[in-house]
Amino acid sequence: MTEIQDPVALLHGLLDRHERQAGSAAATARIDEDRFHSVADWDAFLAVLGTVERKGGVRLVRTRRGGVEHIRTVRLIDPEVVYQVLGRKPSREGAAAAVASVPQEADGAGFASVIARIEAGWARHRTIFGLRPGQTDRLDKAARLARALRRRSQTDESVRQIDYRSFSRDAAGDSKALADTLVAVAALLQADDPARLADLIPEDVVALYGVERLPAPVLISGAVALDGAVLPRAEYLGFPGAVAEHLSPGAPPAYLLTIENYTSFIRHSRECAADDGGLVIYTGGFPSRAVLAALLRLARLSQSTVYHWGDIDPGGLRIFRSLEQALAAEGRKLRPHLMSLELLRERGRPDPQRRRLSVGAAQGSAIAPLWDAMARMETPWELEQEGVAPSRPEDPGA
C-alpha cells in the first residue's frame, strides 16, 4: 500500500502496482488528509480522484469519525479507465512493442520461450535475465551473440579459444556485449539445449563454446610431451589452447583423470600425481573446447582408464555426462572417481538451490546409479569436491 498526495502520481502508482502483480491483487493507496498543506490542496486532490471514481476507475473508501466523512484509501477498480484518463498505455503493450522491435530469426522454440519470458517480465516492470525493461539494444545483442555461439559450436572454430571482448566485437560490434548480457545469452542457449546445458552457470555455458573472459591455459599434471618432446616434470604445466593437438603422454600413464575444481586439481597434483604416474587434466568446471580436445587426444594415445572427479550436484553430474559422451565417440569409457552416493550421504548437505534431476535421464551412463538416487531424494543434496581429500583412482585391472 502506498501513500501519495499528488493524485496523478497516485494513479500512476496504482497502475504500476497492478502491472507488477499482473492484476492478481487489488492495488490500493492510503490517504492521509493531515499531510495536505491546505483545504484547497485537499479539494483539488479529491476533484481529480472524484472524476476518476465517477468513471468507474477507482473507488474512494470512506469512513466517518466524529460525524465527519474522511477518505481512508483509494482502490483500483477498472485499470482500463485509469489508462484512458492518464493517456497511458499498459506496460504489456510497451513490452510487446519493445520485443517486436528486435530483429527475429528462425531461432527455434528454445529461444522463443526465453524471449516470451523477457516480454512477460518487462510487462511487470521486472528485470529478467539481467535485462531491464526496454533494453532492446541489449536483447538484440544477446540474441546475436547466442546465435554466433551456436554457429561456432557447429564448426571447428569452437576448438579455438577466444576472449569475451574479441568474440563480442566480431559477433555484435561491441566488445563489452557479452559481459553485459552474459545471463541472457546463457539463458537462450540453455533453453535451446537444456539436456546439455541446464544447471550450468553462465560462464560455464559460454566456455563450452570456447569463449572465456581470458582464454585459460590447459593445465596438466604428469608426464607430458609436446610434439614428441618429453617436457621436464613439474607440479603441473600450462599450455595455450592452440597446442592441444600437439600434446601426448610423456610416458604410459597409470590413469587419466579430469578434475572439475582448481583447488582439488592442485591438491591431487601435489599429493598424488607426483608419485603415482597419473596424468591429470583440470577442466575448470565445464571444459572448454581446448581442454576437451587435449583430453580426447591424450585418451586416444593411451590405453589408461579414464576417470572424472567433480562436484556431486546436478551441474557436476552433467559435466560427467558431457565428458562421458565425448569419450564414447572415441570408443573410450569414463568412470566416476570420488563421486558416490555413500560420500554424498556421509559428507553432503541439502542443496540450497534445490536443483532437481530427472529419473532415467542418464540411462546407460556410469553415473546413472548416483544420478537416479539423487533424482529420487525428497530433499536434494550436494557435495562440493573440495570437501573430499584427493586419492589415487583405483586400478580396475589390479
Image (tube, rainbow, N blue to C red):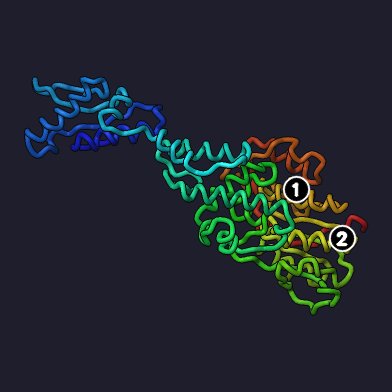
Residue 253 can be seen, yes or no = yes
Quarter holding the N terminus?
A: top left
Q: Is residue 131 above or below residue 282?
A: above
Q: Is residue 315 above or below residue 53?
A: below
Residue 273 x %, y %: 79, 68
Q: Which residue: 77% across, 66% down? A: 244
Residue 54 x %, y %: 21, 20
Residue 64 as seen in the image, left or right of residue 126: left
Considering depth in this image, is 64 or 231 the residue closer to the camera?
231
Q: Categorize mark 2 by other alpha carbons within 10 Å: few (<14), some (14-19), many (20+).
A: some
Assign a secondary structure to mark 1. Answer: helix
Considering depth in this image, is 334 or 344 the residue closer to the camera?
334
Residue 385 falls in which quadrant of the image? bottom right
Mark 2 = which residue? 300
Specify the amino acid type for callout 1.
Answer: Arg
Mark 1 = which residue? 321
Residue 237 x %, y %: 73, 73
